Each structure stands twice: as C-alpha cells, then as structure tokens.
C-alpha cells in the first residue's frame, strides 16, 4: 500500500539522513516511530522518558478528487523533546529539528520517484504548557500516483 511505503520512507529518511548528525546533547539517541509511541504496560520510575526525544511519523489522511487523479496524502511528523535545563532551551532545540526536516524536504520534494511533496509545507510549535516536554510538528502533503484499474493484483 502506497501510504505505508510513504510512511516507511519518511521514517527511513529521518533516521538515516536528517537526524544522525545533529550534535545537540538533548537529541542524543533520538528515536523515530511510526504513528505513535510504543505501548508499554510498565509504569515504573521514568519509564516514559525512554521514548524521548523522538519523532513520530503519522499518516493522517488522504484525498482523491477523481478516479484518475493522483491521491494526496497528509503526513505529520511530530517532534517531542524533553529539556529540564534551567534556561528552558527546549523550544530552540525543537526549532532546530523542525528546520532540519523542513530544509531537507524543501531540497528533496520527491522520494524515489514515487512520492511528490506538494506545497504548502507547514510547521508548528505547541503552545500548550507541557514543560519539560517541547512538542512541534511538520505537516507535509504528498502526491501518490493513481492506482491503475486494469491491475487487479494492485488491490491485494
């Protein structure tokens, strides 16, 4: 399914091309998840902090205007960082990650010749009080080729 391939490709790009060389201590060991943070049944100590910092790649929905048109699929990349420093610089670290993601996709508007990013590219920082966690996102819309109706195996 194209949407799953797109989500997997964006996860791979984050893990291998965008995030590895950021040298900010708060981002050391940043993880990338698909759709959500893994479910856990253990609630001891700071267990929830093992998931931070992280990026979560979410396929949010799509739209097909006509049967022959390409599908437009929205993918949100949620960025969550924990920063307990006195100067509360977590928002700056968050902005650096957002900028890296944004700059990458402005330069690479296509993925593997299969997915094409459409504009506008949007980003946001949550204004909710979540200290010491800082949360933001990058929202992208991708065009996926229409499925051929003469290919019944494509539906399986």
Image: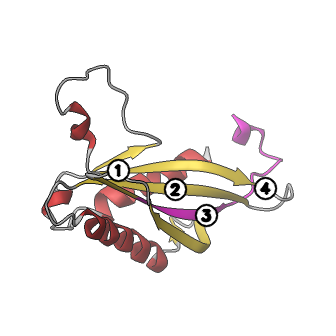
Per the image, label 2 sits on a secondary structure element best described as: strand
Pointer 4 or 1: first along the chain:
4
Pointer 3 or 4: first along the chain:
4
- Between 124 and 23, the one lying in front of the other is 124
Which quarter of the image is occupied by the C terminus? top right
Q: Magenta residues, as a range? A: 136-156
Pointer 3 or 1: first along the chain:
1
The residue at which mark 2 appears reads as: 76
Q: How far is disc 4 from disc 1 in space, using C-alphas?
A: 36 Å
Per the image, label 3 sits on a secondary structure element best described as: strand
Nearest to the eye among marks 4 and 2: give it.
2
Residue at the far top: name it.
Answer: 41
The residue at which mark 1 appears reads as: 130
Taking the image as shown, residue 113 lies to the left or right of residue 18, namely: right
Pointer 4 or 2: first along the chain:
4
Taking the image as shown, residue 52 lies to the left or right of residue 62, namely: left
Nearest to the eye among marks 2 and 3: give it.
2
Q: Residue sitting at 53 percent across and 62 percent down?
A: 139
Q: How far is disc 2 from disc 1 in space, using C-alphas?
A: 20 Å
Pointer 2 or 3: first along the chain:
2
Q: Quadrant of residue 152?
A: top right
The residue at which mark 3 appears reads as: 141
Per the image, label 4 sits on a secondary structure element best described as: loop
């Amino acid at each position: 399914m194209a949407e799953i391939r797109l989500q997997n490709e964006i996860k791979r790009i984050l893990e291998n091309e965008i995030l590895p060389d950021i040298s900010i201590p708060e981002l050391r060991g940043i993880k990338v998840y698909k759709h959500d943070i893994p479910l856990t049944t253990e609630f001891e100590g700071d267990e929830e902090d093992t998931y931070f910092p992280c990026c979560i790649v979410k396929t949010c929905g799509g739209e097909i205007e006509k049967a022959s048109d390409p599908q437009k699929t929205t993918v949100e990349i949620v960025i969550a960082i924990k920063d307990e420093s006195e100067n509360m610089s977590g928002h700056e670290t968050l902005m650096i990650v957002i900028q890296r993601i944004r700059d990458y996709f402005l330069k690479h508007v296509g993925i593997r010749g299969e997915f094409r990013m459409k504009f506008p590219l949007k980003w946001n920082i949550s204004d909710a009080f979540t200290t010491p966690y800082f949360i933001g996102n990058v929202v992208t819309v991708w065009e996926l080729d229409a499925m051929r109706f003469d290919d019944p195996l494509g539906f399986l």
